[in-house]
């Protein structure tokens, strides 16, 4: 049994390398210059901030190609004010790549949000999920009225995306960029796993008007 398990593990690893060779062959067949062009540099218009969940890959969901989407992913697509990783990606995307759109993309049946809505301990990750419990606290009056657990999770997924859109708007990175580039837009999406379609939450922002008085910075 142990040997069989090891053989399966080795095969799944070899499958990745074979998958890579197949991908290179397919791309070269379509365009012999594809990788030469990729190597020249990137000029993406989009920053995607999504969940680490394996079911929501940015390029496939948006039918885009390598080079078109700059990506940051973490568990439950949270944008935390003190997360140097997220802030570095955001700063580079906004100020160097000069992306035109930032998309916060949550997804239905998000395990991170479901965990945050429970009382169970999962370990270290509980500290990360606390940010989502904070979002619940702001909207508990509405979420507590929903009796179906899946619907409760999916509503918190939407509230979480909206909160992270606002969190991005509150950063100095985005607000300073807006002074020179009012075309920079931030959007909130939920990927609906059962259909594949994106639900645009229609919370797109391109200014500080709706942030409340202490969040719009001079
Ligand atoms: Co998720």
Image (cartoon, rainbow, N blue to C red):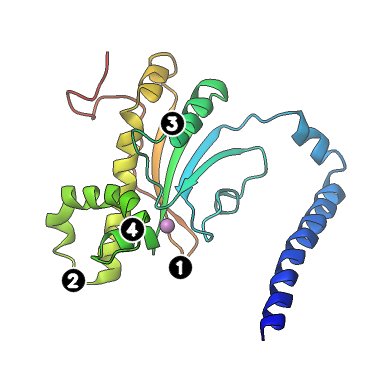
- Say whether residue 105 is left or right of residue 155: right
In the image, 123 versus 48, the foreground residue is: 123
In this rendering, is residue 188 above or below 23?
Answer: above
Q: Residue at x 11, y 56 (%)?
A: 141
Is any atom of residue 59 visible in this view?
A: yes
* Mark 2 crowdedness (10 Å alpha carbons): few <14, some 14-19, many ≥20: few
Q: Choose mark 1 or mark 2, whichever is in front.
A: 2
Q: Which residue is mark 2?
A: 147
- Disc 4 under 8 Å from ligand 1? The reply is yes
Q: Work out whether mark 1 precedes mark 4 in sequence or the reverse, and give the earlier one.
A: 4
Distance, label 1 to label 2, CA atoms, is 21 Å
Q: Which residue is mark 4?
A: 113
Is any atom of residue 159 visible in this view?
A: no
Helix, strand or loop at mark 2: loop
Q: Which residue is mark 3?
A: 87
Q: Residue at x 56, y 32 (%)?
A: 45
Residue 194, numbered label: 1
């Amino acid at each position: 049994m142990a040997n069989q398990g090891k053989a399966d593990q080795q095969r799944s690893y070899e499958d990745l390398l074979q998958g890579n060779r197949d991908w290179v062959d397919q791309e070269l067949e379509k365009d012999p210059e594809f990788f030469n062009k990729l190597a020249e540099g990137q000029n993406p218009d989009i920053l995607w901030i999504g969940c680490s969940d394996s079911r929501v890959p940015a390029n496939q969901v948006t039918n885009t190609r390598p080079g078109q989407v700059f990506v940051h992913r973490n568990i439950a697509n949270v944008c935390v004010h003190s997360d140097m990783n997220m802030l570095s990606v955001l700063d580079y995307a906004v100020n160097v790549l000069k992306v035109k759109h930032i998309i916060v993309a949550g997804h239905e049946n998000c395990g991170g949000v479901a965990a945050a809505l429970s009382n169970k301990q999962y370990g270290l990750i509980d500290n990360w999920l606390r940010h989502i419990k904070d979002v619940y606290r702001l909207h508990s009056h509405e979420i507590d009225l929903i009796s179906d657990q899946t619907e409760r999770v999916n509503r918190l997924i939407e509230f979480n995306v909206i909160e992270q859109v606002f969190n991005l708007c509150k950063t100095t990175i985005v607000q300073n960029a807006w002074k020179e580039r009012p075309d920079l837009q931030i959007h909130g999406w939920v990927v609906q796993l059962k259909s594949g379609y994106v639900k645009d939450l229609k919370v797109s922002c391109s200014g500080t008007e709706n942030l409340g008085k202490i969040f719009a910075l001079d």
